[in-house]
Amino acid sequence: MSSIARIAAGIALALAAPLGVVTFAGPANADDPQILEGICSFPITHEFPKFHSAHAAPVPTTHAPFEGFDTGQAKVVVTNVLNGKSVTLNSSSAIFFRWDGTAVLRGSTVAFFDSPKGDVPAGVWLVVGSLHTTFDDEGRVATVTGGVLRRDICAELA
């Protein structure tokens, strides 16, 4: 499996299953939102009231430092199922898939992690800046380094 296919497989799981993947998946079903447990200390749901994505791969030149990228605009609404509190976040990072099987995210990223992943703790976090991401053999996020933790969403929704 090419690194793009492996990474894309991990990205497709981003919010469908809390496997330590950041939010660069397609919209969740607003009519039947999936309840995510084990990320915050309470169950949460997520929705994408705005989602627009553009993908380019493979990049037509081997001189590029990456083999493809995703970019676009996404708004993510995260809700505490128990108390009804919700927060709307911008998750519009550009994602550059590198030739070595890693990815670099630049911008504003909402991360949903069920366990710590390098510089990003377990929970739901708004992370900004440049993030370097490695993946395991199944395409799930193994580590994230860099970026600045701007907001602890689980704490805001508690």
Image (cartoon, helix red, strand yellow):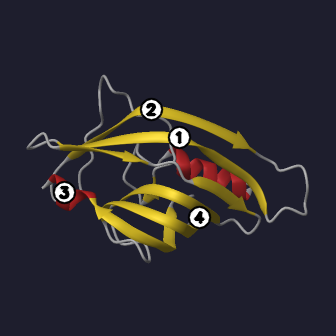
Kindly identify which residue carries mark 2.
50
Q: CA distance from mark 1 to mark 4?
A: 28 Å
Depth check: 106 or 112 in front?
106
Please give the residue where the numbered disc 4 appears in the rendered image: 137
Is disc 1 surrounded by few (<14), some (14 to 19) or many (20+) residues within 10 Å? some
Kindly identify the residue that appears in the image at 30 percent across and 22 percent down: 31
Asked which secondary structure carries label 2, the reply is strand
* Residue visible at 9% across and 44% down in the picture: 82
Q: Earlier in the sequence, mark 2 or mark 1?
A: 2
Q: Secondary structure at mark 1?
A: strand
Quote the CA–CA distance across marks 2 and 3: 22 Å
Q: Alpha-carbon neighbours of circle 4 within 10 Å: few (<14), some, or many (≥20)?
A: few
Residue hosting label 3 = 156
Name the amino acid, label 4: Asp
* Amino acid carrying mark 3 in the image: Glu
Question: Which circle's residue, 2 or 4, is located before the other in the chain?
Answer: 2
Q: Earlier in the sequence, mark 2 or mark 3?
A: 2
- Say if mark 2 contacts mark 1, CB within 8 Å: yes
For the C terminus, give its image quadrant: bottom left
Which quadrant, please, contains the N terminus? bottom right
Q: CA distance from mark 1 to mark 3?
A: 23 Å
- The answer to which of marks 1 and 3 sits earlier in the sequence is 1
Q: Position of residue 134 (x, y in %)?
A: 58, 69
47 sits to left or right of 132:
left
Mark 3, other Cα within 10 Å: few <14 / some 14–19 / many ≥20: few
- Indicate the position of residue 77 as horizontal and vertical percent values: 31, 40
Is residue 153 left or right of 149 when viewed as pictured?
A: left
Residue located beneath label 1 in the image: 73
